[in-house]
Image (spheres, helix red, strand yellow):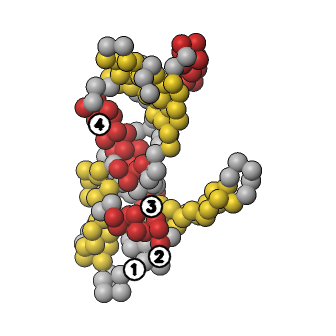
Amino acid sequence: MNKEFDALLANGTWTLVPKLPNANLVGCKWAYKVKRKADGNIERFKARLVTKGFHQQEGVDFGETFSLVVKPPTIRLMLSLAVSHGWYLRQIDVQNAFLHGLLHEDVFMTQPFGFIYPQLPHHVCKLQRSLYGLRQALRVWFSRLTDQLQAIGFINRQADHSLNIYHQGSTLIYLLIYIDDIILAGTDM
């Protein structure tokens, strides 16, 4: 929990502010998971702070949401191209992916259990960045990621929004996004 909390602070995830009388307040909780090695032994214990997005009110602290769906034919096509052409193939799991999403709405969250500032116990967290559980979390993460990809030359395919393609000279790279996982296949490492 300490490691997760430190990462949230280091990323500037929120600022503490006095609670506004009419502000909608989103709760939060700690979610725990045991990460295991391939052989089944415990690798580490993980704690993640998640919001109670069901407390959010449409039009108040979120507008649009987004559900990214990877089309199975796109996955099969990408993998078959990689195998048939002898391309490089990599899988990436983006750590704390949703923390990279910048919020455009004012979202206020209770201070996390076990980490309430003693000097400011009645203040709330005004979120600057997205957290798991927020209704707009995937939308803001995906938007920021695709903006960065487009800035370096990737083109987002409208037929499948999860697919981005980079083509420059003899370099061809396919990048497939599924929530916080990415599959890369291409001619150039």
Residue 175: quadrant of the picture: top left
Which residue was labeled with disc 2?
113
Q: Amino acid at mark 2?
A: Phe
In-front residue for pair 137/175 = 175
Q: At x 41% / y 56%, what residue is drawn?
A: 131
**Disc 3 and disc 2: Cα gap in Å?**
12 Å
In-front residue for pair 187/162 = 187
User: Could you say whether the residue bearing mark 4 is in a helix, strand or loop?
Assistant: helix
Which residue was labeled with disc 3?
51
Q: On the rendered image, what quadrant is the C terminus found in?
A: top left
- Marks 4 and 3, the one that precedes in the sequence: 3
Compared across the picture, whether 170 is left or right of 94 comes to left
Which residue was labeled with disc 4?
148
Which residue was labeled with disc 1?
116
User: Could you say whether the residue bearing mark 1 is in a helix, strand or loop?
Assistant: loop
**Disc 2 and disc 4: Cα gap in Å?**
34 Å
When the figure is inspected, residue 30 is found, relative to residue 70, above or below; the finding is below
Image depth: mark 2 or mark 4 in front: 4
Residue 148: quadrant of the picture: top left
- Marks 1 and 4, the one that precedes in the sequence: 1
Do callouts 2 and 4 mark residues in contact (Cβ within 8 Å)? no
Do callouts 2 and 1 mark residues in contact (Cβ within 8 Å)? yes
